[in-house]
Amino acid sequence: MTCSAFAESKASLEADIAANAKHAAITTALGDLAGEPVNDFRPAQWSALIDHAIVDEDTIRFVFRTGEQVSMALKG
């Protein structure tokens, strides 16, 4: 195996591991959310579902790992 082929194989394995970890985190968070409303904030659930947030002058937009987005007005 050449050095280049090894690097490509390593990168592919790392991508697979990251995808599996992301899937496991989302599945766990969704399992925790199923059935009952959430009464307590749990950072692990939040970070498993939300990719990032965008804050503008008067709104905040949450971008989920699925690509869906939710915007909320900020009260000032």
Image: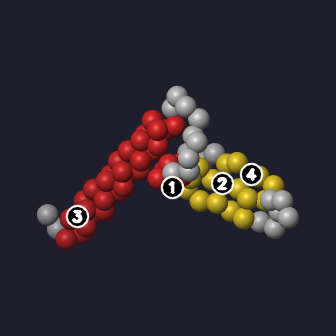
> Residue at position x 31%, y 53% from top?
17
Instruction: Note whether residue 14 is visible.
Output: yes
What residue did someone put label 3 on? Answer: 5
Q: Quadrant of residue 75 in the image?
A: bottom right
> Residue at position x 59%, y 59% from top?
52
Residue farthest left in this picture: 1
Mark 1 or 4, which is nearer the eye? 1
The disc label shown at residue 8, or none: none
Q: Earlier in the sequence, mark 4 or mark 2?
A: 2
The picture places residue 51, in percent across and down from the top left corner, at 55, 56
Three-letter amino acid code at disc 4?
Answer: Ser
- How far apart in space, not on screen, are marks 2 and 1 (Cα)? 15 Å
Residues 32 and 73: in front is 32
Mark 2 or 3, which is nearer the eye? 2
> Residue at position x 56%, y 50% from top?
41
State yes or no: discs 1 and 4 in contact (Cβ < 8 Å).
no
- How far apart in space, not on screen, are marks 4 and 2 (Cα)? 6 Å
Is 29 on the left or on the right of 66, as rendered? Answer: left
Secondary structure category for the residue under label 4: strand
- How far apart in space, not on screen, are marks 1 and 3 (Cα)? 39 Å
Secondary structure category for the residue under label 2: strand
- How far apart in space, not on screen, are marks 1 and 4 (Cα)? 20 Å
What residue did someone put label 4 on? Answer: 71
Secondary structure category for the residue under label 3: helix
What residue did someone put label 2 on? Answer: 62
**In the figure, 68 relative to 3: above or below?**
above
Secondary structure category for the residue under label 1: helix
State yes or no: discs 4 and 2 in contact (Cβ < 8 Å).
yes
Three-letter amino acid code at disc 3?
Answer: Ala
What residue did someone put label 1 on? Answer: 43
